[in-house]
Every structure is written in structure tokens, then in C-alpha cells.
Amino acid sequence: MLDETLVGGVKTNLAFLHRVLAHPAFASAELDTGFILRHEAQLLPALSELPQAFWQLAADAFIQSEPAQRRPGGDRAAPELPGCQPRGARHPPGRQPVPALAGQTAHRQPLRPDCRREASHHPHGGLTAPMNGSIVRVLVELGQAVEAGTALVVLEAMKMEHSIRAPEAGTVKAIYYSEGELVGDGTVLVELS
């Protein structure tokens, strides 16, 4: 049944469940609260790079679902900006699953044609919190010059740390919150000039 299950849009533990059910100790009903720990090497293998077969499946699925869009050089357009959201009725909202190996599912997201244009005109000013959370660290000071990609603030949300980075080079014009303060989704944290 697990082999026939495909879940799109969210990460699941289907591959782990498959390994548990396929384990000889599980089939022999050698079960207790130490089962996973005893068989950790087989049930929770170390992460490795995805095999070439996965990338071939992903490329085939992408090519079959997209119109033949061309760049000036004649090469096929590819989704280069993962932050861009799909638009229009051609694709259902959200991510689309690409079948992979060993019960895993990867996702691709179609690129909007106007995405590159919007990304190149990113507002050079306020940098906002991507979700509700608390400020863990402020990594810059007023007046500090920063390069594109410099981490400015670290926000903790949903038990994960998120680095808010400079979209381009500039100078820190304002810092609106201190370490330990709670902020809401969309709150401006830092302003660059």
C-alpha cells in the first residue's frame, strides 16, 4: 500500500515507514520502544545526494509540463528563482509532485514569465519577517555597509532559525527590533539605503 501512496506538497515519512515495514525484525514482531534505536542504521540511513535517475525523472516531468519557452540564446528557460510563485490557471496552485525513488517525492514549481523582471526590481529598503517569531540575533549595526547576501537578523520561528539577508549591497539605515523581541509576519525588521 505504501508503494502506491503519493503525497504532494508536503514532506512525509513514507520512505521511513516503508523501511520499517520491510525490516525483518518488524516482520518477526520483534517490537518494543527500542526498535528504531536498535535498527537506526537501516531505518534512518545517512543523507546522500540524489541519484542521476531522480534528476532525469524530474527533468522529464518538467519538460512535459511546460511550453517550449526560449531564451534569447535559444536555450530552454529554467526556473532559476525559487521564491517566485506560480500565476494563472494553467497550473494548479502550489507545488507539483515529481515521482522519485524509494517512496520519496520531490517538488517543482513553475516559473512565472514576469518573475525575473520582478526579482530584478526587488525593493531596496525594508526587510520583513517571513512569519511570526522572535529575534534571536541582530548581526549588523546602524551605518554598517553590507554586501548582497549578508545575514542581517536571525529570526526563530517554528523551532527553526531563519536568516534575513540583504538582497543587495547597501548601508543599514534602521534596525527596528532587538534580540528577544517578538515580531509578526511581514513586520519590517531592518531598512537598508
Image (tube, rainbow, N blue to C red):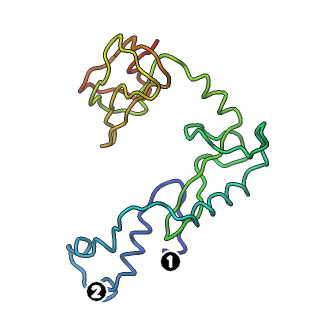
As drawn, 3 above or below 165 = below
Dividing the picture into quadrants, the one containing residue 162 is top left
Of the pair 78 and 19, the residue shown nearer to us: 78
As drawn, 159 above or below 130 = below
Q: CA distance from mark 2 to mark 1?
A: 19 Å
Where residue 128 appears, as percent x and y from the top left, is 43, 25
In primary-sequence order, the first of circles 2 and 1 is: 1
- The kind of residue tagged 2 is Ala
Tag count in the figure?
2
Q: Which label number is shown at residue 57? A: none
Left or right: residue 135 versus residue 172 is: left
Determine the residue positioned at 24% across, 81% down: 31
Left or right: residue 136 versus residue 116 is: left
Left or right: residue 31 versus residue 61 is: left
- Mark 2–mark 1 CB contact (< 8 Å): no
Looking at the rendered structure, the secondary structure element under dot 1 is: loop
Where residue 181 appears, as percent x and y from the top left, is 26, 25
As drawn, 29 above or below 42 = below
Of the pair 29 and 64, the residue shown nearer to us: 64
**Which residue is situated farthest in the bottom direction here?**
28
**Which residue is situated farthest in the front direction here?**
73
Looking at the rendered structure, the secondary structure element under dot 2 is: loop
Determine the residue positioned at 53% across, 53% down: 9
Determine the residue positioned at 33% across, 32% down: 155
Of the pair 85 and 81, the residue shown nearer to us: 81
Q: Which label number is shown at residue 29? A: 2
Where residue 72 appears, as percent x and y from the top left, is 78, 36
- The kind of residue tagged 1 is Met
According to the image, label 1 marks what residue?
1
Query: Dot 1, how many residues are within 10 Å of its Cα: few (below 14), some (14-19), or many (20+)?
Result: few
Where residue 98 appears, as percent x and y from the top left, is 60, 60
As drawn, 175 above or below 137 = above
